[in-house]
């Protein structure tokens, strides 16, 4: 092999070898997938049949990636004209004053439902060690001022759809029994719960229906069916997508639109577009 041929081959192999790194750093983290599926809800009023519920999770506004990407994604999401929008936590990454100020800018351009917009907090919204109550209160104030109804172990009914929101599992305010003791099975219920590990806790009081979660980011990097090396949950089956809990509950884990770190491989960021149907 001549020197010229060697250098050519070395360059080709270097380009091929670096492509996965470049892809997982600069392409996939900003390649949002709009996942469309049906959401069959028990006791759904007839006039909500066919309405759109958009599920967005884990914005992670901060300094880990350029959050202008979130605003661009919200612009694309507007074309679905959602009737309801739910945000399932981790609005910021670190809970600093800079994060809060950036969140204000992002939420001014966010997507909102024609009939209602609801949110719950995630662990990152509680700042350092998930215990900063001041950060969580500031985030709730920002979101409420932007038109998001924040549910902290609370429920709110909108046009016949009853949204039940849990505070985060790792936060000082986690108290789902506060609301689940009043669970009314005759309503069209949907539970928002940031961390899917809550599904394994004894807090459900016979609830049967959908649970919408986030938190895992789908692992951010994985080879489906082979390995998902990093998952922030105890139950390793809680990765992403639809999971039948086999007791009348159905779990859907959104892969997140933001990232803790700007890297994704075979786990595109997600906004979920649910069409409401009668169960």
Image (cartoon, grey):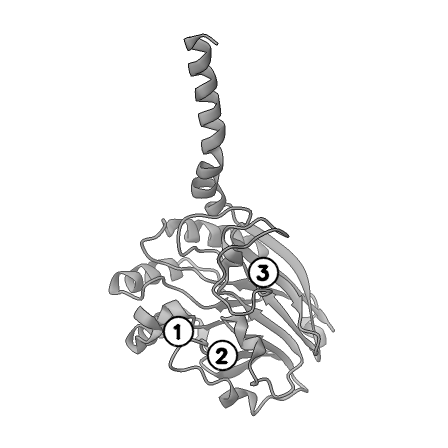
Mark 1 lies on residue: 144
Is 191 situated left or right of 45 in this image?
Answer: left
- Which residue was labeled with disc 2? 166
Between circles 1 and 3, the one closer to the viewer is 3
Residue 1: mark in rendering: none
Disc on the earlier residue, 1 or 3? 1
Labels 3, 2: front one: 3
SS class of the residue under badge 1?
A: helix
Residue marked by disc 3: 240
| Res 128 → quadrant | bottom left
Residue found at the very far top of the displayed protein: 2
Q: Relative to 32, is 279 above or below?
A: below
Q: Residue 222 placed where, x, y %? A: 54, 50
Callout 2 environment at 10 Å: few (<14), some (14 to 19), or many (20+)?
many
Mark yes or no: residue 141 visible.
no
- Secondary structure beneath dot 3 equals loop
Q: Residue 91 or 163: which is nearer the viewer?
A: 91
Question: Quick check: 266 left or right of 38?
Answer: left
C-beta proximity under 8 Å, tags 3 and 2: no
Q: Judge depth for marks 1 and 2 and give the one in front.
A: 2
Crowding at label 3, few (<14), some or many (≥20) Cα neighbours within 10 Å? many
The front one of 124 and 192 is 124
Residue at horizontal 50 percent and vertical 50 percent from the top: 221
The residue positioned 48% from the left and 33% from the top of the image is 19
What is the distance, in whole Å, between disc 1 and disc 2 at their CAs? 17 Å
In the image: residue 216, left or right of residue 185: left
């Amino acid at each position: 092999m001549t020197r010229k041929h060697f250098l050519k081959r070395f360059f080709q192999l270097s380009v091929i070898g670096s492509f996965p790194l470049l892809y997982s750093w600069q392409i996939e983290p900003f390649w949002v997938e709009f996942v469309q599926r049906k959401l069959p809800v028990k006791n759904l009023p007839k006039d909500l049949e066919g309405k759109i519920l958009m599920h967005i999770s884990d914005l992670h506004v901060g300094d880990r990636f350029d959050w202008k990407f979130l605003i661009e994604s919200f612009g694309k999401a507007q074309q679905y004209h959602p009737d309801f929008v739910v945000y399932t936590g981790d609005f910021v990454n670190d809970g600093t004053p800079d994060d809060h100020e950036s969140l204000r800018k992002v939420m001014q351009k966010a997507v909102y439902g024609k009939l209602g917009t609801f949110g719950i907090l995630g662990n990152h919204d509680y700042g350092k060690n998930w215990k900063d109550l001041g950060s969580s209160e500031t985030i709730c104030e920002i979101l409420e001022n932007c038109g998001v109804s924040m549910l902290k172990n609370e429920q709110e009914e909108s046009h016949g759809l009853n949204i039940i929101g849990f505070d985060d599992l790792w936060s000082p305010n986690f108290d789902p029994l506060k609301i689940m003791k009043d669970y009314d099975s005759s309503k069209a219920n949907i539970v928002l719960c940031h961390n899917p590990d809550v599904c394994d806790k004894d807090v459900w009081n016979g609830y049967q229906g959908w649970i919408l979660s986030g938190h895992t980011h789908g692992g951010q990097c994985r080879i489906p069916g082979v390995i998902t090396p990093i998952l922030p949950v105890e139950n390793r089956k809680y990765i992403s997508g639809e999971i039948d809990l086999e007791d009348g509950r159905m779990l859907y884990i959104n892969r997140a639109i933001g990232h803790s770190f700007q890297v994704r491989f075979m786990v595109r960021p997600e906004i979920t577009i649910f069409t409401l149907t009668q169960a």
